[in-house]
Image: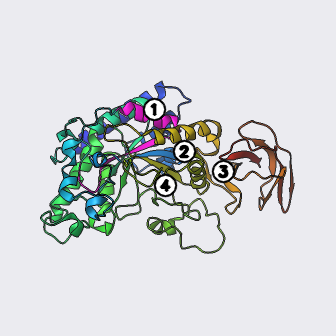
Amino acid sequence: MAKNCSARLGLLVGMIAYACMSMSTSAANAGDAAARLLFSAGDTAGSVAGETETQRTSWYREAKFGMFIHWGPYSVAGVEASWPIMEPEAQWNITEPEYVSLFKRFNPTKYDPKAWVELAKEAGQRYMVFTTKHHDGFCMFDSALTDYKITNTPYGKDVTAMLAQAAQAAGMPLGFYYSPPDMHHPGFRDTSKPVKDTWQGDPTRPEWTSYLSYMEGQLRELLTNYGPVVLIWFDGLRQQEKYKGREVLDLIHQLQPATLVNNRIGVPGDFATPEQFIPDRIPTKTAANELQGTRKTPETGPPSLPAPGDFQLWETCQTINDTWAYNKNDRKFKSVKELIQELVEVASKGGNFLLDVGPTPEGTIQPEFVERLQAIGKWMKVNGESIYGTTYGPLQDLRFGKTTAKGTTIYLHVFDWPSRPELILPGLTAHVTQITVLATGRKAHFRQKPGGLTIALPPLAPDPNDSILRIKTR
């Protein structure tokens, strides 16, 4: 009981400090807006009992765009996180003993968490999610429960604490990725055998309860030692029910009531997390479980708009190239146009876009990632109104673009600017009162008939990536 009371007191103090920091910086700062929404929703009586789902998730619904960070000793070898020992492939060219020993060479002397936070803000990202422990079991935080951790590397510093401090100072909401699977812990698997043969874990072993206690202890550390944690991003892989997710959620809400949780620990959580794809239609609560492992929801026929109560809050996580972690050989970078249009498509279905970076072993973010994030940020400064705080748009099957919505305003995102000087928008039933080009503020002439809306356009697209028309309705 004393521990719980102490944790709650520490949480309250931390949240107040965080909110004050956020409010002391510029009101125009994107991270500040999200931080203020977070604390207005989560800083009341320290309990979720009096809050609706919408209140708890309001900052997240507003944020829309975040930075995912996969970083650990695996960056030294330029290989993917954990999977080279779980499912060895020739492309990785590393043995299990070599992989496990990488931490002895991990010394990111150029690590500057303030620069990471500033880059996220420059990109227009309103929250960050950091990998505190991937499936390999290596802890990027100073856990008292293991020696396999960042403070036992040549670097010797708690990089999670450093990032948390930088994020709090800048008013940037920070969440933690935490892997329930753990290849290093003998309670999770028989560590006398190769990882490739045991990586799914075995809850029938008597040692399993020791692993659940270990996981609980580390979650307590993360939720009491690092200030406000806006979300926990689990990655439970298969047979997630073995982690007793309901008890885990209760623990999280006991320690930090405002913390959101994703859907990868055997229970629904606050938001669904499709990975490396965008669902073909707006996710609903009945289809939430299918979203994690498939590209399509069970619904058939043309896309339809769910009722607000049926909408499933969701977020897709994606990479800028084809690798989550740092890989100098992966040159398959998505273009700025691709990334902006993916962000728009996600927002048009009501989702959040969590875009990943894999920092180098020195602790920097490679220039190809920086260039793309900065370019997205420039676009967001002009067009962010059509993304932040929006929900799914009323027209879901347009060939030339997407729609997002905010109140009675519809944002028409035109990916393919027509060669002729007008655009026909079928199926819009709301009464239109005004249309402007978002980037310039120029009014566009239009005609509305029962069959649709015809909009007169400037001859050239305002933006080569995505041009937006702001449509006011009543």
Kind of residue at disc 2: Glu
Q: Is residue 398 above or below residue 156?
A: below
Residue receiving disc 1: 118
Tell me whether circle 1 and circle 3 mark residues in contact (CB < 8 Å). Answer: no
Kind of residue at disc 3: Ala
Please name which of the two marks, 1 or 3, marks the residue nearer to the observer: 1
Dot 1: within a 10 Å radius of its alpha carbon, few (fewer than 14), some, or many (20 or more) residues?
some
Q: Mark 4 or mark 2, which is nearer the start of the sequence?
A: 2
Q: CA distance from mark 2 to mark 1?
A: 19 Å
Q: Residue at x 58, y 51 (%)?
A: 338
Kind of residue at disc 1: Glu
Q: Viewed as shown, does residue 157 lie left or right of 126?
A: left
Q: Mark 2 or mark 3, which is nearer the start of the sequence?
A: 2
Q: Residue 455: image x %, image y %?
A: 83, 50
Q: Residue 64: image x %, image y %?
A: 53, 47
Tell me whether circle 3 and circle 4 mark residues in contact (CB < 8 Å). Answer: no
Residue receiving disc 4: 315
Quadrant assignment, res 130: top left
Residue receiving disc 3: 405
